[in-house]
Image (tube, coloured by chain):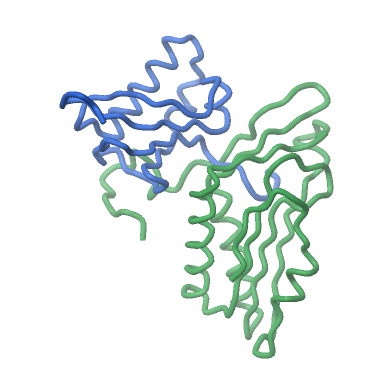
Chain colours: A green, B blue
């Protein structure tokens, strides 16, 4: 599994190519790129920062869980940090599997879960100011307070 | 090491909007031994508010805490030498 946090451009096509193996019938790719606006406000660039060591551990955990949960053969998960401009890849998810159903499901689960659990933040620079993007709430298992649920992660 | 018992030293890390509000990414603090994550978070919230850098309570209600790089519940007890990170809701990955 190729799990990385990088500071330079993500070589998406090369990563997808190296993920393919003879046993695979499908490779599902999610290429997350920087959009030119947020709710109509024009974006100049995004600055991504991370709690790097923890983020990498979380990403490794997600990739391993995707393999067991969906039965896919291999996963690549790469996130870029630093300043990104419109059109650049911020995150790449690649899932290789014998069948397409599991590949689609695992790919969707990986990006959705990464988005709410991996400690990475982005600051959006607009023509008229900068703001930290609002994140989605943490899942109950990660929250400090979550009612009576005392189950720890994993 | 500390010269007397009763206090512990932890390293506190701030990320995202909290780093901007704190004005720095990390700080070492001395705390009473036996302090829980929930108590620590309440102290941090109060000290940010005293410094007039209070954000909407919505932000503080949504913060997660990592102890030694793992998400921690409110009842986890902090130990001397711990690395404690305050994590605003994350926003990596794709656009909104």
Up-down relation of residue A66 to residue B45 (above or below): below
Residue B35 at x, y = what percent?
23, 30
Q: Nearer the viewer, residue B7 or B41?
A: B7
From the viewer's perspective, is residue A103 above or below residue A93?
Answer: below
Is B25 placed above or below A68 here? above
Quadrant in the picture for residue A143: top left
Nearest the viewer among B18 and A35 is B18
Which residue sits furthest bottom? A22
The total of numbered circles placed on residues is: 0
Q: Residue at x 51, y 14 (%)?
A: B53
B93 vs B22, left or right, is right
Q: Residue at x 38, y 50 (%)?
A: A141
User: x, y (%) of residue A9?
Assistant: 78, 53
Residue located at (65% from left, 77% from top): A96
Q: Is B77 on the left-hand or right-hand side of B46? A: left
Q: Position of residue A114 (x, y in %)?
A: 56, 54
Q: Position of residue B23 (x, y in %)?
A: 55, 20
Residue at x 35% of width, y 24% of height: B29
Along the horizontal axis of the image, is B53 left or right of A103?
Answer: left
The residue furthest left is B5
Between residues A92 and B80, which one lies in front from this camera angle?
B80
Q: Quadrant of residue B5?
A: top left
* Image quadrant containing the N terminus of chain B: top left
Res B3 quadrant in image: top left
Residue A62 higher or lower than A53, as above or below: below
Q: Is residue A151 left or right of residue B83?
A: left
Quadrant of the rendering where the C terminus of chain B is positioned: top right
């Amino acid at each position: 599994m190729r799990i990385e946090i990088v500071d330079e451009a993500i070589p998406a096509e090369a990563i997808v190519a190296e993920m393919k193996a003879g046993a695979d019938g499908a490779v599902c790719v999610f290429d997350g790129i920087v959009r030119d606006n947020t709710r109509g406000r024009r974006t100049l660039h995004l600055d991504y920062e991370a709690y790097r060591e923890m983020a990498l551990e979380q990403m490794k955990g997600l990739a391993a869980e995707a393999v067991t949960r969906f039965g896919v053969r291999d996963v690549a998960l790469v996130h870029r940090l630093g300043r990104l401009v419109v059109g650049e890849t911020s995150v790449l998810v690649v899932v290789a599997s014998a069948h397409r159903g599991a590949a689609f499901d695992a790919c969707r689960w990986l990006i959705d879960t990464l988005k709410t659990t991996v400690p990475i933040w982005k600051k959006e620079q607009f023509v008229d100011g900068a703001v930290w993007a609002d994140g989605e709430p943490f899942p109950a298992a990660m929250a400090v307070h979550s009612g009576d649920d005392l189950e720890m992660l994993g | 090491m500390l010269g007397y018992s009763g206090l512990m030293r932890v390293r506190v890390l701030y990320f995202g909007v909290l780093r901007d509000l704190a004005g720095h990414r990390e700080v070492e603090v001395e705390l009473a031994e036996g302090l829980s994550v929930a108590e620590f978070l309440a102290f941090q919230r109060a000290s940010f508010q005293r410094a007039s850098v209070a954000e909407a309570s919505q932000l503080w209600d949504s913060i997660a805490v990592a102890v030694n790089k793992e998400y921690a519940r409110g009842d986890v007890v902090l130990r001397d030498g711990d690395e404690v990170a305050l994590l605003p809701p994350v926003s990596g990955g794709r656009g909104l």
